[in-house]
Image (cartoon, grey):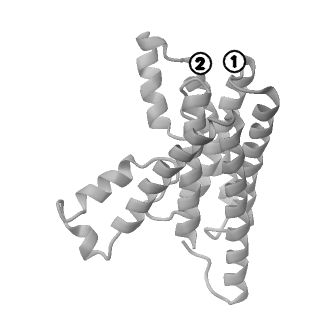
Amino acid sequence: MHLVLMLVLTFTTGIVDAVGYLGLDRVFTGNMTGNVVVLGMALTGADDLPVVGPVLALLGFMGGAALGGRVLKRAGEPWSRVTGVLFGTVAVLCIGLAVVLLVVGEAPDPSVGLPVTTVLGLAMGLQAATARFIAVKDVTTVVVTSTITGLAADSLLGSGKAKASGGGSGRRLWAVVAILAGASVGAALLRWHTGAGLLLAGVLIALVTVVGHLHADGRRAAGEPVTA
């Protein structure tokens, strides 16, 4: 169950990054590797790439991750009331930002776009820290570079370890497919409105929060450990 929920969150990250890059002046709010690369190129003046947006997204992401790490110091099980509150907070932030964008209209100016970028980065940092705490192997919900590396290196063309270990390849492949599908859906929804993707992402994160909470409660009631 935790694997499925983390894959859904990976899907939402694809949506959020599509909204950020295509709708908020080429800024990644979930994939900080891409953000750092964009910032590095922007600092040389290449192709009029943004500088302020990536910096704010990075700061927001780091702040959200730090906040998540601080709060999770009090959490015991991989999925607890604390993790549920953190995921719920991410859902509320995404839905709230979607409402803001739906109200202000398309292509918000920097006075709106930059705060949205910062808060969205914070939300994704919070989500990433919480997913890291739950620790579903090979599914970080925000990046797939290491996942693709493991998929290829452990495949039959590589070391063959995936087959010997019972197949981490499946979950790695699904993680890549999830973020790819999310980015496609996010890009498609931008044709309707900038806030549409964030609204869908927020609703899905809220569903993950509820399902995860119910699943954990069911395991506890049955006297079973709540593990990833």
Packing grade of label 1 (10 A; few <14, some 14-19, many >=20) is: some
Q: In which quarter of the image is the N terminus?
A: bottom right
Residue 225 can be seen, yes or no: yes
Q: Name the residue under label 2.
A: 52
The reply to whether callout 1 and callout 2 are in contact (CB within 8 Å) is yes
Q: Quadrant of residue 172?
A: bottom left
Work out how far the residue at label 1 is from the one at label 2, CA to CA, in angstroms: 10 Å
Residue at image x 59%, y 23%?
A: 53
Q: Where is residue 69 in the image (x, y as percent from the top left)?
A: 62, 50
Lateral position of residue 221 relative to residue 24, left or right: right
Q: Name the residue under label 1.
A: 110
Residue at image x 71%, y 22%?
A: 108
Residue at image x 75%, y 39%?
A: 98
Q: 181 and 121: which one is in front?
A: 181
Q: Where is residue 192 in the image (x, y as percent from the top left)?
A: 67, 37
Above or below for 53 versus 195: above
Secondary element type, mark 2: helix
Q: In which quarter of the image is residue 52?
A: top right
Packing grade of label 2 (10 A; few <14, some 14-19, many >=20) is: some
Q: 36 and 68: which one is in front?
A: 36
Q: Where is residue 123 in the image (x, y as percent from the top left)?
A: 67, 43
User: Which residue appears farthest toward the right when viewing the image?
Assistant: 103
Q: Where is residue 169 in the image (x, y as percent from the top left)?
A: 34, 65
Lateral position of residue 178 relative to residue 107, left or right: left
Q: In which quarter of the image is residue 215?
A: bottom right
Lateral position of residue 122 relative to residue 228, left or right: right
Secondary element type, mark 1: helix
Looking at the image, is mark 1 or mark 2 nearer the viewer? 1
Q: In which quarter of the image is the C terminus?
A: bottom right
| Numbered tag placed on residue 144 in the rendering | none
- Along the polypeptide, which appears first: circle 1 or circle 2? 2
